[in-house]
Amino acid sequence: MINTLLIGGKGTIGAGLRSYLPRLDPDYRIVSADLPGAPDKAIEEDAQREFLELDASHDDELLRKALEGRDLVVYLARIDPLNEMNAMTDKVFKAIMDVCPDSVVIGSSSVHATGGAYYGYTREENSPIAHRRFDEVDPWPEPLSVMTEPCPTGDYGVEKAYVEAWCHRLGAHGQNAVAARWGGINPTNGKKDEISYFTVWCHQEDSARFVDACYKTAQAGKLRPSAHYYVISDNTYNIFDIETTRREIGYEPQHDAESLYGEDLGAHSLRVE
């Protein structure tokens, strides 16, 4: 049994992990710790639904009890404003270090932690990538390296960079901790009316494949300390480095955003590696 705690597991990412991790390996036993009354975004009938009511930002005693004996901890919870979010992150990671220092930890970051490095391709008003005018892109930009240091452009990115710093701290203390720079994940694994979503899109199954790969790599003693990885599906028009993730942990994404966007204006057969 892989004794797993998702802190904030009723949300979109957690819903996907509760659905797809047990399909990848039936040994996953998942408990989701969430605020009382938090809505469950899982839509798959076989999503694991063992819940614990917990306000991780305040109830330190219950948080520490929930962490006891865990093999895998995934930190997904968030609150606003930024100072309260960072205070909760402090509380959670300090508890992890004290209670379950042998667990594998996945800290929830985001592509937004490096927004300053990729917004030029995806957000500028005239960006051909953002508007799917791919024939105008020559050469295609080199994928943004997983080694890219945080360069957030707003509070959301700043909170994710703070989580990454904590993952580095755990790694420095010898714990297996990874920051997941999640892409665009949504409950229905569908298309969204959001500029450049096709390049950041990540299917929930692929997010689970990432977590499973991290855990199995750590169990084999091969997880790179304090790594941060982009968690993106195998998108044709990708601008993020997922090849390093494949090579280092055996990440095997199965989905491509072009299954949703391929009929759009400007799509063609270019494959971005």
Image (cartoon, rainbow, N blue to C red):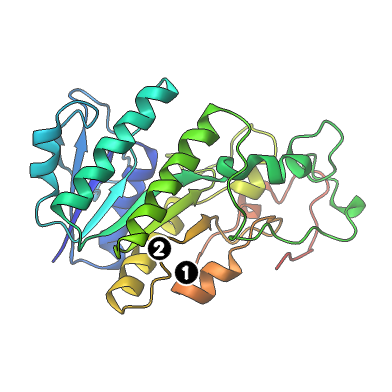
Q: Is residue 92 above or below residue 144?
A: above
Q: Quadrant of residue 208?
A: bottom left
Which is more toward the observer, 79 or 93? 93
Residue 120: horizontal and vertical position, in percent? 78, 41
Residue drawn at x 74%, y 41% as measured from the top left: 122
Residue drawn at x 9%, y 35% as measured from the top left: 62
Residue 266 in the figure: left or right of residue 261 = right
Question: How many numbered marks appear?
Answer: 2
Say which mark, if any, is on residue 84. none
**Which residue is label 1 attached to?**
251
Q: Is residue 69 above or below residue 43?
A: below
Q: Are marks 2 and 1 in contact (CB under 8 Å)?
A: yes
Say which mark, if any, is on residue 209. 2
Q: What element does badge 2 sit on?
A: helix
Residue 136: horizontal and vertical position, in percent? 92, 51
Residue 238: horizontal and vertical position, in percent? 68, 56
Residue 134: horizontal and vertical position, in percent? 84, 51
